[in-house]
Image: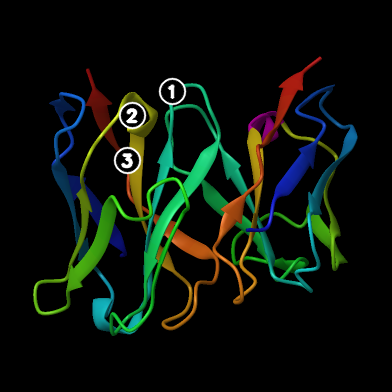
Amino acid sequence: DIQMTQSPSTLSASVGDTVTLTCRASQSISIWLAWYQQKPGKAPKVLISKASTLENGVPSRFSGSGFGTEFTLTISGLQPDDFATYYCQQYDSYFPVTFGGGSRVEIK
Amino acid sequence: QVQLVESGGRVVQPGTSLRLSCDASGFSFTFYGMHWVRQAPGKGLEWVAFISSDESKKDYAASVRGRFTISRDNSENTLYLQMNSLSSEDEGVYFCARDRDWGSPSYIDYWGQGMLVAVS
């Protein structure tokens, strides 16, 4: 199975900062990567699919990039509502789905 | 609007079985693949299983393969997860989730609210 490794596990930031989260796959997954945001006690919400496609209704301050084994999620101008945990998920059709371990964005 | 409502979660003893259900509404259930995803207390998301729209494809995480069975009833718009030989490792919140596609697993665009399974 493909292992997904996210870094950092926790990041402290302030409102207005630009933050970048990284997700690495143990082997190439082309563009088959999604990013989710989860707040405590809630279900996750999809932000980005196919590595860089912003889902409907997701603010444009979120952006994704990457291909193969290395991917990033960037939040440009962090808002109070963005303090949450972010997960990547690979969905390469040749392998079972796997999630990364998550990156928690907390208030500095 | 899309709604996914899980049921069946409860406290069970180790080694026993449990069946979870997920009632789907607000979309054409027959046309979408479905997932179960779980989250242990204080931990990250763990994908559990996927079933394609026509049940021709089923995938399982290595941690549950051989113990869990995913199924669906398209006439009743219901997704199931039969869980056998439960252990404390299986404890957590179980989410029913809709895949964006119908065949092979893709990404998840809708989630249920989650349901707690406790093994004690």
User: Start and end of the magenta stretch?
Assistant: A80-84
Residue A106 % position (x, y): 73, 21
Q: Residue furthest top?
A: A108
Residue B96 % position (x, y): 33, 53
Quick one: SS at disc 3? loop
Residue B8 % position (x, y): 13, 42
Pick whichever, A68 or B60, lies toward us: B60
Mark 1: amino acid = Pro
Q: Is residue A15 above or below residue B82?
A: above
Verify whether residue B112 appears in magenta. no
Q: Is residue A18 above or below residue A93?
A: above
For the image shown, how many numbered marks are present on the structure? 3
Residue B72's image quarter?
bottom left
- Report whether mark 2 lies on the same chain as mark 3: yes
The residue identified by callout 2 is B91
Instruction: Tell me which residue sits at (71%, 49%) in the image.
Output: A4
Q: Is residue B118 above or below residue B77?
A: above
Asked if the residue under mark 2 is in contact with the one under mark 1, i.e. CB atoms within 8 Å, the reply is: yes
